[in-house]
Image: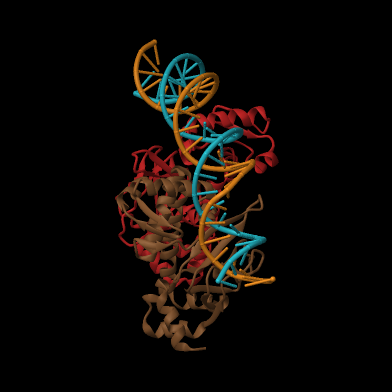
Chain colours: A red, B brown, C orange, D cyan
DNA sequence: CGATTACTTGAAATTAATCAATCCACGTGG
DNA sequence: CCACGTGGATTGATTAATTTCAAGTAATCG
């Protein structure tokens, strides 16, 4: 394993970034890297994942099959995101499925090794707690938003977030519109109509999967 | 402070329950107890809370004022629940408000002391991480549900959860129906109509704030 | 190039919010 | 002890938003 490359992965993750250099190297030594081609299933519901997973490059779709048999998209991991649950629940089976949306690189750390690391470094543990705590309040907020705002607001928020995550006002949608629809709990038809409306309102421009945000403030007001 | 009483609080919280006795005593020594009368505001949005808060007895309403000026109920803390965020975000202002719904007892631990505790006890930190990780997946699921299912499904889930939390198929609603409405992101009128429908369908019986679940399976099917 | 899948558009049907009027329960003060 | 007032709950009628159904068009992949 290429230690230099592993260190890049360590530096990518906010969780590890504030660690002293020596400790980063310790972490890097534990990392095993994997590449997954577009479309590959990384783990499935029912698997017990024994690794702490960090997405180095690419995009990973986390989804679940709902009671009605439809696929429910839960989230899309971006580079730097990690899957903490897989590292913290010993032996428990996952109830979600992870699929590589595009060619992706993953850094993984063995569960036991990661837990040992946490025991050694209280700084790391506290940092991880802070990140997870933040995730909790974000999810809390998103949950509220999901039941409060209308579909236009949800799509507006999605576009703003995606733009922010990709760091550009012009971007390609990482998901097919029908997937955005299930992600936002609506239908492709509604998404299509809202895109049309936002375009005629000159808030966005869009052709195919390319979107350009023209009026960020207007979009923010819709949330 | 009554150490014995503090120990009861420690034993109440799943987070601390698996600690060795000696360490429980250490935790108990850090606890300061407070009583809040029904209706008291424990902290408000804008406050910076410097304590790790554990609800020993009573119920605490966590709410937020939405952009439209309406109060949005985020959750109701039950005995044994804790507010981790208040302990992990140094100095940051809270954006939610906590109100005692009924007379409540709270055990609090100073933020610094709690963080020191985490640094000392990796066991505690890992345990806390596991709990928060579980909360994250639950919230993830709730968020999905919020945008997927119809209002009947949301109320069905709420009733099932409340019944489970209170450990009885016959129970008194801990919230006013109008609060249940904002919690579920709907209106009192809709809640009223669904209660009526569930009653005529003989899935529940209800009078005033008392609810009896007659057909749990039917209720589950609605989710 | 053909077939499958995604996207768009329109019309009808459904769900829930809003508006408006009572009804009911409870606590207060007379 | 009772009348009154207030806030909560219910009910009906109306309106708005979104889903569903149906059809057709565009894009993609082998």
The relative height of residue C23 versus residue C3 in the rendered view (above or below) is below
Quadrant of image for the N terminus of chain A: bottom left
Q: Nearer the viewer, residue A176 or B144?
A: B144
| Residue at 60% from the left image edge and 73% from the top image edge | B50
Quadrant of image for the C terminus of chain A: top right
Residue B148 locus on image (x, y percent): 45, 43
Determine if residue A219 is in view.
yes
Taking the image as shown, residue A197 lies to the left or right of residue B30, namely: right
Residue B60 locus on image (x, y percent): 53, 68
| Residue at 48% from the left image edge and 49% from the top image edge | B192
Taking the image as shown, residue A58 lies to the left or right of residue A155, namely: left
Determine if residue A31 is in view.
no
Could you tell me how many numbered marks the image carries? 0
| Residue at 57% from the left image edge and 41% from the top image edge | A150
Q: Nearer the viewer, residue A120 or A44?
A: A44
Taking the image as shown, residue A77 lies to the left or right of residue B50, namely: left
Location of residue B37 by image quarter: bottom right
The relative height of residue B63 versus residue B20 in the rendered view (above or below) is above
Location of residue A113 by image quarter: bottom left
The relative height of residue A135 versus residue B4 in the rendered view (above or below) is above
Residue A204 locus on image (x, y percent): 64, 32
Residue B171 locus on image (x, y percent): 39, 63
């Amino acid at each position: 394993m290429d230690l230099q490359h592993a260190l890049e992965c360590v530096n990518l993750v906010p969780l590890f970034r504030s660690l002293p250099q020596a400790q980063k190297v310790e972490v890097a030594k534990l990392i095993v890297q994997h590449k997954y081609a577009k479309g590959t299933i990384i783990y499935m519901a029912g698997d017990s994942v024994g690794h702490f997973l960090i997405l180095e490059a690419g995009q990973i779709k986390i989804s679940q099959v709902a009671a009605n048999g439809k696929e429910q998209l839960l989230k899309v991991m971006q580079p730097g995101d990690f899957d903490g649950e897989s590292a913290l629940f010993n032996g428990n089976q996952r109830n979600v499925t992870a699929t590589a949306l595009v060619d992706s690189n993953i850094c993984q750390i063995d569960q036991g090794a990661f837990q040992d690391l946490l025991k050694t470094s209280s700084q790391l543990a506290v940092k991880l707690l802070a990140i997870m705590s933040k995730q909790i309040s974000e999810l809390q907020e998103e949950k509220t938003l999901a039941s409060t705002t209308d579909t236009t607001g949800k799509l507006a928020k999605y576009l703003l977030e995606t733009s922010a995550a990709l760091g550009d006002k012009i971007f390609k949608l990482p998901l097919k519109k029908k997937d955005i629809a299930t992600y936002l709990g609506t239908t492709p038809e509604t998404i299509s109509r809202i895109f049309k409306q936002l375009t005629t309102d000159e808030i966005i421009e869009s052709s195919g999967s390319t979107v350009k945000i023209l009026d960020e403030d207007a979009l923010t007001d819709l949330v």
